[in-house]
Amino acid sequence: MQLQLFGLNTAHIHLLLNHFPILGSIIITGLFIVALIFRNTFLQKVSLWFLAGIAVITAITFQTGSGAEQAVLSLNMPQVVSLSALQSHKQMADVGLVLMFFTGAISLGSAVFYRNKPALPRPLLVLMLVILLVNVGVFTYVSYLGGMIMHPEIRTFVATTLHYL
C-alpha cells in the first residue's frame, strides 16, 4: 500500500526529501567551517541544531525508500531501471542512516549539553568537522547511486567515460 500525501505517493515524497541529507550536510559543513574559522560559538551551536534537524529528515527520507522502490519496480521497465544501482543505493542508504543517526545524536546531545557554556570543547569541534566531511562524502555517493537508478543517460555517460580512461 502506497502512502498518499497531498496527491503525492511515497516515491514523490522520497524524491522531495532525499535532497535534504546531501544539501543539508554540505550547507551545514560550510557553516560549521565558517564558524570554526571565525571562532563563532553561536554559529557552531546553530550548526549542531540544524544537523540534529537534518538527522530527523534523513530518517523520514529513509522510511520512504521502500515505497519508492516499489513504485520503481512496478514500472517494469528493465531498459530504464538499474536494479544494481537500486541495490547499491539501498546499501549505501543504510550506511548513511547509521552515520546520520550517530551524527544527529552527537550534535543534539552536544547542543543541549553546551547550550549555556561559553564555548564548545576543541575535541568536539574536531570530531564534528570529521563527521560532517564523512557525511558529505557518504550522502553525495548515496545521491549519485540514486540518480543512476532511473537515468540511463547518466549510466551511459559514466560507462563511456570509464571506457576512455
Image (cartoon, grey):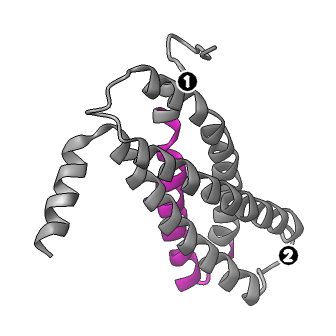
Q: Is residue 37 above or below residue 137?
A: below
Q: Quadrant of residue 160?
A: bottom left
Within 10 Å of disc 2 (Cα), the crowding (few <14, some 14-19, many 20+) is few
Residue 40 shows in the view: no
Q: Quadrant of residue 83?
A: top left
Q: Is residue 19 left or right of residue 147?
A: right
Looking at the picture, which amino acid does disc 1 mark? Thr
Q: Position of residue 57 (x, y in %)?
A: 64, 43
Q: Earlier in the sequence, mark 2 or mark 1?
A: 1
In the rendered structure, does residue 37 fall within the stretch colored magenta? yes
Q: Which quadrant of the figure contains the N terminus?
A: top right
In this rendered view, identify the residue nearer to me: 43 or 156: 156
Q: Which residue appears farthest toward the left when viewing the image?
A: 164
Looking at the picture, which amino acid does disc 2 mark? Lys
Q: Is residue 120 left or right of residue 9?
A: right
In the rendered structure, does residue 146 fall within the stretch colored magenta? no
Q: Main secondary structure of the magenta part?
A: helix
**Residue in the image at 75% along x and 81% along y:** 124
Q: Is residue 46 left or right of residue 133?
A: right
In this rendered view, identify the residue nearer to me: 116 or 50: 50
Instruction: Specify the segment rendered in magenta.
Output: 16-41
Q: Give yes or no for contact between labels 2 and 1 (Cβ–Cβ under 8 Å).
A: no
Q: CA distance from mark 2 to mark 1?
A: 42 Å
| Residue located beneath label 2 in the image | 117
**Residue in the image at 53% along x and 26% along y:** 70
Q: Which quadrant of the figure contains the C terminus?
A: bottom left
Q: Position of residue 117 (x, y in %)?
A: 85, 75
Name the element at disc 2. loop
Q: Position of residue 121 (x, y in %)?
A: 78, 85
Within 10 Å of disc 1 (Cα), the crowding (few <14, some 14-19, many 20+) is many
